[in-house]
Image (cartoon, rainbow, N blue to C red):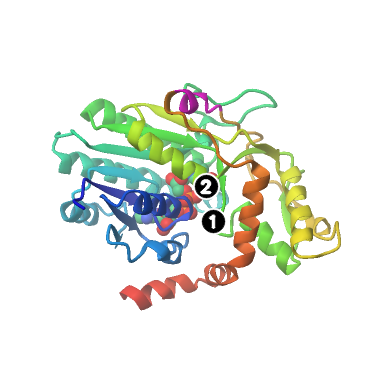
Amino acid sequence: SAIEKSILVTGGAGFIGNHVVRRLVNNYPHYKIINLDALTYAGNLENVKDVADAPNYSFVRADITDLEAIRVVFATYAPDVVIHLAAESHVDRSIEDPLIFVKTNLLGTATMLQVAKESWKEDYAGKLFYHVSTDEVYGSLGETGFFVEETPYDPRSPYSASKAGSDHLVRAWGHTFGLPIVLSNCSNNYGPYQFPEKLLPLFINNIKQGKPLPVYGQGVNVRDWLYVEDHARAIDDIMHKGKQGETYNIGGHNEYRNIDLIRVLCKLMDKKLGREEGSSEKLITYVTDRAGHDMRYAIDATKLKEDLGWMPSLRFEEGLDKTIDWYLNNEEWMAGVTSGDYQKYYEKMYGK
Ligand code: NAD
């Protein structure tokens, strides 16, 4: 069938990006999906192996901070839509090494915006720059209340500050140059293919191996959890039906204190691994809290529900169950990711 639209997904080899790419490639054979990724430590072509041979899929290795490289990508693929997910994404790394977050998330986003503006030459019919962001830009909540789209920005980590800045850049290109933009800010994602530096895959792996479970502070920080495929579906809905210039909050209405989540996980893992009840919980060790650790995030996703009809499809218990099974059934993926083998995999497939 004839190609109706070219969609450039940045960061498509990362955790959320692979789910977005898979969904678009499989559901829209008349769209051409171009996955642009620099393949940093967090990007892994194994994550998109199942769509690699699809006729409507291409992969291009490029760095979003490299102006000339991004120009070449636009000249080659002439994308109508950009779904921008590429970013440095891990708060702990942003505390250790903040400058790469400023470079990738700010300069990288500005580079994507600028090249989109140049290549679309103000012919914006059918064009869209969709920026994927986080609820962490809104700061930290007390015990009550929710983030809405109008909540003032109050980012508090180098990661969230760099994402907040990237959101501002996107709005500035929209306001100043008329670039057609849309944004979404989502809560914590979980599910298959998440890099095992993040809480759930890390803890699943550690429990399996009988290693300690390092819990920050008292474990009382609250996060709202959303299954990653529900996020990918929200992105699909917003890309197709969202109003230009708008922002949509995406969340699961699934708040857990870290320690409560970890206890639920431990119980499930005991069962699945056939271990004595309570044995996984014994691995919990409290460690020095993360510097500047935000207390609570919670999203009010009413706008997305009322305007576009989106709702989470999975209850947390179901999502967690599926997620654990996936990690237990994909030991090779986990081993490859933890040993850095996927870097070599890329070189083997595509050269340096
Ligand atoms: P991730 O770290 O798993 O993936 C990031 C991807 O971007 C990787 O494939 C990496 O190789 C690529 N990348 C990094 N720097 C690049 C560069 N300079 N040029 C090209 N590609 C580069 O992150 P994720 O968890 O999938 O998050 C994706 C996006 O969603 C991010 O923008 C993040 O801020 C946002 N987000 C994440 C969550 C979450 O819970 N994970 C929640 C809300 C929003």
Report whether the residue tagged 2 is closer than 8 Å to ligand 1: yes
Specify the quadrant of the image occupied by residue 281.
Answer: bottom right
Residue at mark 2: 228
Q: Is residue 82 magenta?
A: no
Position of 166 relative to 13 (above/below): above
Q: Nearer the viewer, residue 18 or 139?
A: 18
Q: Which residues are magenta?
A: 300-306
Q: Secondary structure at mark 2?
A: helix
Is residue 159 visible from the viewing direction of this image?
Answer: no
Q: Nearer the viewer, residue 218 or 42?
A: 42
- Give me the disc on residue 118: none
Specify the quadrant of the image occupied by residue 171.
Answer: top left
Residue at mark 1: 194
| Badge 2 amino acid | Val
Distance CA(mark 1)–CA(mark 2): 9 Å
Asked if labels 2 and 1 touch by Cβ distance under 8 angstroms, the answer is: yes
| Badge 1 amino acid | Gln
